[in-house]
Image (spheres, rainbow, N blue to C red):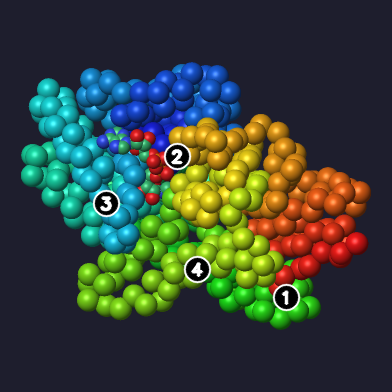
Amino acid sequence: MKILYIGGGFVGTCSAAVSADSGHDTLVFDLDEQKMKKLASSDRAVIEECLYEEGLADLLIRNKERIRFTVDYGQVEQFLDVVDAVYMCLPTPEIGETGESDVSYYVSAAEQLTKALIKRNQGRQEKYVVIVNKSTVPIEMITATEEIMDKAGVKNYGVVANPEFLVEGKAIQGSIRPDRVVVGAWREKDFSVMRQVYQRFYNSATVKYIEVNPKEAAAGKLLANYVLFNKLAVCFDVIGRTCEAFSAVRFEEVRKILNTDPRIGTWGLYDSLYAGGSCFIKDARSLAHQLQTAGHGATLAQETYLANKRQLELFLSRAEKDAGMSWVGKKVGLLGLAFKQDTNDVRNSPSIDIVRFLLENRVAHITAYDPAATGYFQQLFPSNAQLSYTTNETEVLRGVDVVVVATDWPQFRGLADLLADDGSDSQDHPLIMDGRRIWQNRYADLQRAGFDIIAVGSPFLPGEKK
Ligand SMILES: NC(=O)c1ccc[n+]([C@@H]2O[C@H](COP(=O)([O-])OP(=O)(O)OC[C@H]3O[C@@H](n4cnc5c(N)ncnc54)[C@H](O)[C@@H]3O)[C@@H](O)[C@H]2O)c1
């Protein structure tokens, strides 16, 4: 099959890489020239600096004959003569804080596409083409896409919803071995094209291949993200909070009681300072906005969003409330800038709000470290007298008043040893703020070594005074 991807970000590139690996001839178009050059470079370091996803560089290098990246619409126009499917992988952020999805990137790309589609096959438009909504879009967007195509005179096409369920950090593994593939279409002809695109998964023993109508597919994606986001919010705002409120109610022990009930399951029962990333927040807000626009209440959907926001505010406020510390003039070490481990994505990362908060509260200095996301974070907060970035994680611990763990990179676990060893022979005991419970099995040692600890899911843990 010949497949065009419009938008070569996380979703477009990962999805195109897996398509190329499934034997399809793929072309990725994006407006960002630097990104396209880096992804086409066949150089692992350059690819990973641009888009850090385990296994992606391998796939791009291995399939370089079947995947091209371009910013030249001329190449897109030529390809459209033979293309079977066009995947729309455009961003759909929320408009301000309204919850409403900003579909302007999508609409602008679709309008540009129509101009090329009507010219395909020298204007005869003989080649049947399926437009695939891979972006997470509002439930009614399928109709809007058809209207854009019809208004421009595009013929011989179908529109399909094929929501993406990839998990950043595991996107390639997840796309090669998905739990499910969801295809929403109105017509058999379109299902049939998509079955060829996904022949790797159709009839697979391990993948659930789900065919529904396109509105159900779009709704299913938004609802799935909302349910997951809600589960995290329950974990933070109810389960974690209960463990913070009562002494000797340990989060990990309570979790065992909960997650051995198969109805509750294991996913999401990890306490954290915030659920960030590009999807959960905006998709839950978009769902709430769509429900309200349709004349319904959306109290629970809104409250999930607020609970997540509250979690980060409460965590940061505990330095003053629990440890009696004023942030003014303090030196802070910040571990982690990515919104979670195994990615360089900083969209809605808790560290963004943490850095803003620290600067507003007039700390003396912040030393920050992340194994993958420093480059993108620095674009938001360039180094200055108050903020510096280090390439050595241990430097974050040295000579600071507070250490904040914001991302759950596994490599940070070992730093507890260093703190405990140094702390036993020194008078310097920075306040530890563990926003991921990454050091939970070392809290007792760290307290013995003299550290005060504020951790999500624990009451204040004072250090032993020597
Ligand atoms: N990131 C995820 O984990 C994830 C998971 C599931 C679904 N989604 C959804 O997929 C969609 C894309 O998300 P993403 O994370 O890949 O976003 P992204 O920002 O990483 O990528 C979007 C790309 O589109 C490009 N672009 C913007 N306007 C364009 C245009 N007119 N023509 C061509 N390219 C254009 C941008 O330059 C960018 O590279 C969103 O709707 C998102 O909600 C994302």
Residue at image x 69%, y 76%?
243
Residue at image x 75%, y 42%?
398
Quadrant of ligand 1 in image: top left
**Which amino acid, by three-letter code, is at mark 1?**
Val
The residues tagged by marks 1 and 3 sit, at their Cα atoms, a distance apart of: 40 Å
Locate residue 57: give its quadrant: top right
Q: Residues within 10 Å of mark 3 (few under 14, many from 20)?
A: some
Q: Residues within 10 Å of mark 1 (few under 14, many from 20)?
A: some
Along the polypeptide, which appears first: circle 3 or circle 2?
3
**Which amino acid, by three-letter code, is at mark 2?**
Leu
Q: Residues within 10 Å of mark 2 (few under 14, many from 20)?
A: few
Along the polypeptide, which appears first: circle 1 or circle 3?
3
- Whether residues under marks 1 and 3 lie with C-beta atoms below 8 angstroms apart, the answer is no
Residue 195's disc number: none
Q: Secondary structure at mark 1?
A: helix
* Above or below: residue 133 compared with residue 101: above
Nearest to the eye among marks 3 and 4: give it.
4
Q: Which residue is mark 1?
A: 254
Q: Is residue 336 visible?
A: no
Give whichever of 433, 294 is nearer the camera. Answer: 433
Locate residue 283: give its quadrant: bottom left
Q: Which residue is mark 4?
A: 310
Horizontally, residue 119 falls left or right of residue 392, namely left
* Above or below: residue 436 compared with residue 130: below
The residues tagged by marks 2 and 1 sit, at their Cα atoms, a distance apart of: 38 Å
Q: Which residue is mark 2?
A: 380
Q: Quadrant of the C terminus?
A: bottom right
Q: Position of residue 135 (x, y in %)?
A: 34, 47
Nearest to the eye among marks 4 and 1: give it.
4
Q: Which residue is mark 3?
A: 102
